[in-house]
Amino acid sequence: MKKVITYGTFDLLHVGHINLLRRAKALGDYLIVVLSTDEFNRGKHKEAYYSYENRKTILEAIRYVDEVIPETCWEQKISDVVDNQVDIFVMGNDWEGKFDFLKEYCEVVYLPRTEGISTTQIKDDLHK
Ligand code: C2G
């Protein structure tokens, strides 16, 4: 069984997230999403609209997602990959190159982002 892993906040879920998750799952048989906790987001200077529990519930309802676990720090990626026997690490290419240190543990794939949509864009548009 080929296991895939990806990371993110996935707030205000939109088609950019779904495109990423669909393509990530297509690379293997089992997709683990490591979801940023509210505490970790504060460290990313991100304030998610939905709580971790709500974002987790939403992600678990997506057909491409097999498992959701918490992201509490930047340093957990190697142990996540090793402990879960992950074969492929996937992120949008806004992170291009940032996680190449994982290449000694698994395949690293950066996928093109979906243009024209982001959680920040949605928030800005709603404030107009
Ligand atoms: N994404 C995308 N296209 C968009 C928006 C997002 O492909 N239009 C991708 C991002 O590249 C990322 C994933 O969807 O791979 C989740 O995006 P965010 O929730 O914004 O994740 P981020 O805040 O980048 O957190 O440790 C890594 C961090 O947790 C990543």
Image (cartoon, rainbow, N blue to C red):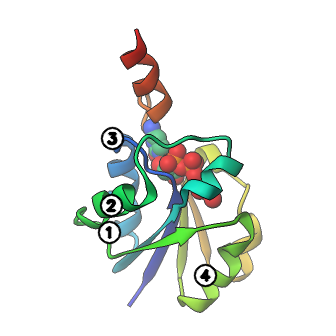
- Using residue 44 as the reference point, say whether residue 67 is left or right of it: left
Instruction: Please say if the residues under marks 1 and 2 sit with CB atoms less than 8 Å apart.
Output: yes
Of pointers 1 and 2, the one earlier in the residue sequence: 2
Instruction: Please say if the residues under marks 1 and 3 sit with CB atoms less than 8 Å apart.
Output: no
Of pointers 3 and 4, the one earlier in the residue sequence: 3
* Residue situated in front as seen by the camera: 24 or 119: 119
Of pointers 1 and 4, the one earlier in the residue sequence: 1
Of pointers 2 and 4, the one earlier in the residue sequence: 2
Q: Is residue 7 above or below residue 79?
A: above
Rendered image: mark on residue 65: 1
Mark 3 CB within 8 Å of ligand 1: yes
Q: Nearer the viewer, mark 2 or mark 4?
A: 2
Q: Secondary structure at mark 2?
A: helix
Quadrant (top left, top right, bottom left, bottom right) of the C terminus: top left
- Direction top: furthest residue: 128
Snapshot quadrant of residue 68: bottom left
Residue linked to disc 4: 81
Mark 1 CB within 8 Å of ligand 1: no
Rendered image: mark on residue 14: 3
Residue type marked 4: Val
Snapshot quadrant of residue 99: bottom right
Badge 4: how crowded within 10 Å, few (<14), some, or many (20+)? some
* Residue situated in front as seen by the camera: 68 or 102: 68
